[in-house]
Amino acid sequence: MQKQISNLDKLTLSNDFLFKHVMLRKRICKHILEELLHTQIADITYLEAEQTIDVYPDSHGIRLDVRIADAANTHYNLEMQVKNPVNRATGKFLLPKRTRYYQAMLDTDMLQKGQDYDELSPTYIIFFCLFDFFQDSQRIYTFKKRCLENMNIELADEAVIMFLNTLGTKGDVSPDIQSLFDYINSNTITSNFTREVADTIVEIKNDKKVRDAYMTYEMRMKDLRDEAHAEGKAEGLAEGKAEGLAEGKAEGLAEGKAKEKTATAKCLLSMGLSVEDIAKATSLSVEQVEAIKAE
């Protein structure tokens, strides 16, 4: 138990668990959205933090760190992304298509409540990234759909995806957002806002309910890792068995061919053919035929 508690004490804002709990503080989350979008927000409502949406029984569920709606019914999904995940099989980065999937799930979740297409709320999917995915040093990368033939024409589907590059050096952000980036990167307090965030983190870590929740979270993550390890081990054994059967079959075929060549060589030797001719006829080396002759 002590190990789990000390683990919580070591967490920084870049950790999913702690990020979610900080974003659940309405004053902080609302201020971040206002600073990012350069707008005033009357109020925000939380739509289940860390919600998992499963559309169909066999679909790929997604875990959403923080889902929010404001007074104008604009929906926001905030995510912390520490690593840049890659599909090991294809070598392709997963983040772009993950945003596509998140958007689809958010929209589907709204439609399941009986809304028509034109009632879909405006959405912002916002990733806080501790790496520069697009390698252009922008602090913020904002994506909306536009016509390739005329970039002035925007598809007004009101869906926006933002990648916040905490390492960025290009583009303007407010002082509080820059101080937040600095705090995420190095845990350095450089403004009153990050002082508030740091104080909030201390408060969160001292909250018994949060500590209990983190212990449960740790156990759940351990169970998932153990399940993944067990599945990987089972797959490895199955692959090993299949490879073993394939290797055994190949070895058997090779051994059968070798015996056939040996029998053919012996037959040709009994007919008086030369070692060189037999080697040519059987694809054996002269040395192999000499060895058979000496038996």
Image (spheres, rainbow, N blue to C red):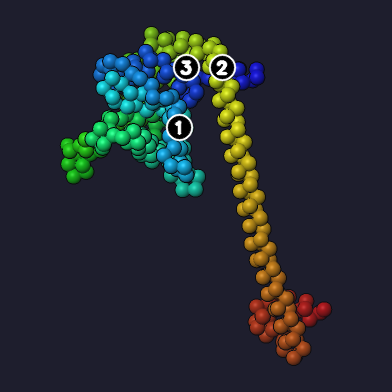
Of tags 1 and 2, the one toward the viewer is 1
Residue farthest bottom in this picture: 271
Q: Is 148 displayed left or right of 237 in the figure?
A: left
Q: Quadrant of the N terminus?
A: top right
For mark 2, what is the residue? 211
Mark 1 crowd level (few <14, some 14–19, many ≥20, 10 Å Cα): few
> Helix or strand or loop: what does disc 1 sit on?
strand
Q: How far is the residue under mark 3 from the one under mark 2?
A: 21 Å
Of tags 3 and 2, the one toward the viewer is 2
Q: Nearer the viewer, residue 279 or 246?
A: 246
Mark 2 crowd level (few <14, some 14–19, many ≥20, 10 Å Cα): some
Q: Nearer the viewer, residue 76 or 239?
A: 76
Q: Amino acid at mark 2?
A: Arg
Q: Amino acid at mark 1?
A: Thr
Q: Quadrant of residue 282?
A: bottom right
Please tell me which of labels 1 and 2 falls first in the chain. Answer: 1
Which residue is drawn at the image coordinates 49% and 48% (left, top)? 89
For mark 3, what is the residue? 187
